[in-house]
Image (spheres, rainbow, N blue to C red):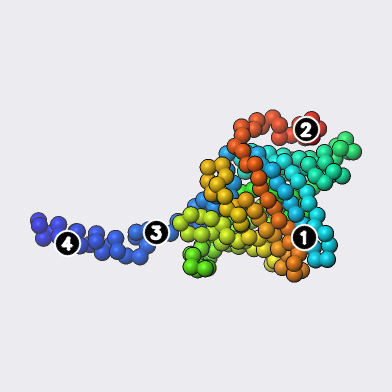
């Protein structure tokens, strides 16, 4: 009996030492979910967003928005600046997206892929989570500046989302997104993003700046800055076209 116990103990010890038995890698779905939790609070929240568009040889353009986010499928965006656009509001419910202009009585349907300003698409502001919209696959791990990263390939589950394909680099251990590449259906790369200015926000260290570079035009980029992130209980009843007409500025 003692001999049997020794054999069992030896087998267990060998199994623990085998690669993949201890400290197994998380699934691609889990990595993506954790990265989303880092990028944004997973509860309802409000956030102020400033978008700066930079083009070579031109003065930068800036726009400011107040954004209300409920879950992964409902968002209201209030345009606060520039003055000419103040009063314009946008609504996302599931994959439907509308814009309401002060001079127009009816909300207009637009797409998440349409550009908001510079390199920034509507979906870059309105749809803040990747999980649920994309099917992730863990392609490899990559070492960058002495840190290890998961490289995920994300394929859109629905053609109404902002991008058809995304490559996302997520740091091992803390699940901090580092960068991303966004692709069209044709396979053409649309923009390259970097997640920057990690700060303590809403109880977690999160990136407060997203830099989007145009890979075809050197020096052309858009910068999205996030400030005043506040967890808030947002009722479902406000996420409709009628409420957009009642927004105050």
In the rendering, at what x and y percent does residue 21 appear? Answer: 34, 60
Mark 3 or mark 1: name the one nearer the start of the chain: 3
Q: Is residue 101 above or below residue 112?
A: above
Q: Residue at x 69, y 30 (%)?
A: 237
Q: Is residue 4 visible?
A: yes
Q: Is residue 166 visible?
A: no
SS class of the residue under badge 2? loop
Q: Residue at x 29, y 60 (%)?
A: 16
Q: Nearer the viewer, mark 4 or mark 3?
A: 3
Determine which residue is flagged by label 4.
Answer: 7
Mark 2 or mark 4: name the one nearer the start of the chain: 4
- Measure how far apart labels 1 and 4 are at the Cα level: 67 Å
Rendered image: mark on residue 247: 2
Rendered image: mark on residue 54: 1
SS class of the residue under badge 1? strand
Mark 1 or mark 4: name the one nearer the start of the chain: 4
Mark 2 or mark 1: name the one nearer the start of the chain: 1
Determine which residue is flagged by label 3.
Answer: 24
Q: Nearer the viewer, residue 238 or 88?
A: 88
């Amino acid at each position: 009996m003692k001999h049997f116990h020794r054999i069992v103990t030896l087998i267990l010890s060998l199994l623990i030492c085998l690669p993949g038995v201890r400290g197994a890698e998380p699934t691609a779905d889990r990595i993506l979910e954790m990265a989303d939790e880092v990028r944004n609070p997973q509860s309802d929240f409000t956030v102020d967003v400033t978008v700066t568009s930079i083009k070579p040889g031109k003065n930068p353009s800036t726009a400011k928005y107040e954004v209300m986010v409920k879950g992964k499928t409902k968002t209201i965006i209030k345009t606060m600046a520039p003055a000419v656009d103040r009063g314009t509001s946008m609504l996302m419910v599931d994959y439907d997206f509308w814009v309401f202009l002060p001079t127009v009585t009816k909300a207009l349907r637009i797409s998440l892929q349409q550009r908001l300003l510079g390199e920034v698409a509507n979906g870059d502001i309105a749809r803040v989570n990747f999980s649920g919209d994309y099917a992730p696959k863990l392609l490899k791990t990559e070492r960058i500046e002495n840190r290890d990263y998961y490289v995920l390939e994300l394929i859109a589950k629905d053609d109404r989302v902002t991008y058809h394909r995304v490559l996302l680099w997520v740091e091992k251990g803390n699940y901090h997104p580092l960068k991303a590449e966004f692709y069209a259906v044709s396979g053409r790369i649309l923009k390259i993003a970097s997640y920057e200015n990690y700060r303590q926000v809403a109880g977690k260290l999160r990136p407060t700046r997203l830099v989007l570079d145009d890979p075809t035009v050197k020096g052309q980029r858009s910068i999205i800055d996030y400030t005043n992130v506040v967890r808030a209980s947002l009722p479902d009843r406000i996420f409709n076209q009628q409420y957009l007409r009642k927004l105050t500025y």
